[in-house]
Amino acid sequence: MHRRLRSALLALVVLPLSTGPALAIGTLDQEVLPGGGAAASFGAMSQTFTVGMTGDLDTISLYGNAWSSGPVWNVSITAVSAGAPTGPNLATGSAPAPGSPDWTDIALTPALPVTAGLQLAIVVQEVTPFWYVGNAPYGGGSGNVVADFAFRTFVTPRPIPTTEFAHLVITSRVSTTTDGAGTESVSIAASSTVYRTITIANGGTNPLAGLTVTDSGLGGVLPASCPALPSSLPVGGSYTCKFSEIAKAGTTTYTTTAAAGGETATGHVVVIGTSAAMIPTIGSKHGLPSAPGVYTGSTKVSALNRYVTWQADFGAARAGERVGVQVATKSADGSWGPFAGLTSRLADASGIVRFSWRQSEAAWSSVRFILDSGPRTPAAQARWR
């Protein structure tokens, strides 16, 4: 979980401004235009903001630059408490910073369901490019420096129902590190520690009373270390618990169910307990396998009709084995469909398999690899736009 951010060490630099447009899938929601100074920080920087429309927060845009081609924007979206970022990452994204001041669009993974009036925080991780301060105060939040930062948020709207409703949203994540952002599945050596995060939010228009939570792990109830459940979950409010478990051998699917005010929601995570030598890894890069580049776990944002290649490493002990390729896609409402087997590959002499894919229309794809004998990789995403 994030600690409250400390005061940033600042250096104000006057640089020429660029007016490059922000290209995003969603509709522009919140905006602070850049002023004439850039904040250079040796610590994390943040900006809180208030959501203006109900829908899916899928993109943010930051104004700034890097002195060289190396630095990238590494950002996360968190909840806000007492005016400061708090709790686990609700969504993350990264993108290269330009060499001269300009807007950089950063796709968020996953797109975050939001409601009008909800306050969130943009957190830029340490060792960052220059982030410009805004040209005027922002009334919906504040930066953790001497002024608000220049930023934009983009939301894909969802239809507002004609009658009031209450709706629970539950997010489950699993990670191999205490402060990891987490995914929906992870492979880890059996008998080692895995960290689970459960977040429950009220994404509706009514407060929810009588919240109950059950989990298929740990005897069906949340551990005593979790915070007490609120007597009423306010509109836009959320509850988060992060705890650790010992990974069991084999594949275990944990199901978390929340209920309140006649509403229910479920979340699922998968833990694959393997021997240390069997933990597969996954990464992706732009282009076909012969193209230059390094396979990384970050979401790849690609132009239409351009390839993205995924690579999995199952280890030399799996050489020659057949590996299934499973793909899931995101629907128009922002929800992911189920994984389905698309094709298969034979692992090479090093236990490596690769799969290349391209889209001619705007789309999200999530890919994972699975052996017939059971072990599978986490999923890695790509987006075409």
Image (cartoon, grey):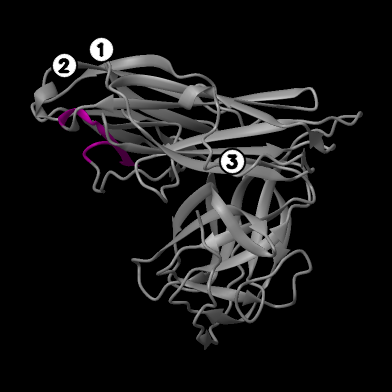
Does the segment drawn in magenta span residue 222? Answer: no
Helix, strand or loop status at disc 2: loop
Which three-letter amino acid code belongs to the residue tagged 3? Ala
The quadrant in which residue 241 appears is top right
- The crowding category of the residue bearing disc 3, from other C-alpha atoms within 10 Å (few below 14, some 14 to 19, many at least 20), is some
Q: Which residue is mark 1?
A: 372
Q: From mark 3 to mark 1, how far is it between C-alphas?
A: 32 Å
Residue shown at 57%/63% (left/top)? Answer: 62
Q: Is any atom of residue 304 visible in this view? A: no
Which region of the structure is painted magenta?
A: 277-290
Q: Which residue is mark 2?
A: 321
Image vertical order of residue 360 relative to residue 74, above or below:
above
Q: Are marks 2 and 3 in contact (CB under 8 Å)?
A: no
Q: Which callout, 3 or 1, points at the residue further toward the start of the chain?
A: 3
Residue shown at 80%/33% (left/top)? Answer: 159
Q: Are marks 2 and 1 in contact (CB under 8 Å)?
A: yes
Question: In the image shown, does 241 or 370 lie closer to the viewer?
Answer: 241
Question: In the image shown, does 82 or 94 lie closer to the viewer?
Answer: 82
* Image spot of residue 4 (x, y percent): 56, 65
Residue shown at 61%/73% (left/top)? Answer: 144
Which three-letter amino acid code belongs to the residue tagged 1? Asp
Question: In the image shown, does 338 or 96 lie closer to the viewer?
Answer: 338
Q: Are marks 3 and 1 in contact (CB under 8 Å)?
A: no
* Image spot of residue 38 (x, y percent): 55, 80
Front of the two marks 2 and 1: 1
Q: Which residue is mark 3?
A: 111
Query: How many callouts does the rendering have?
Result: 3
The quadrant in which residue 275 appears is top left
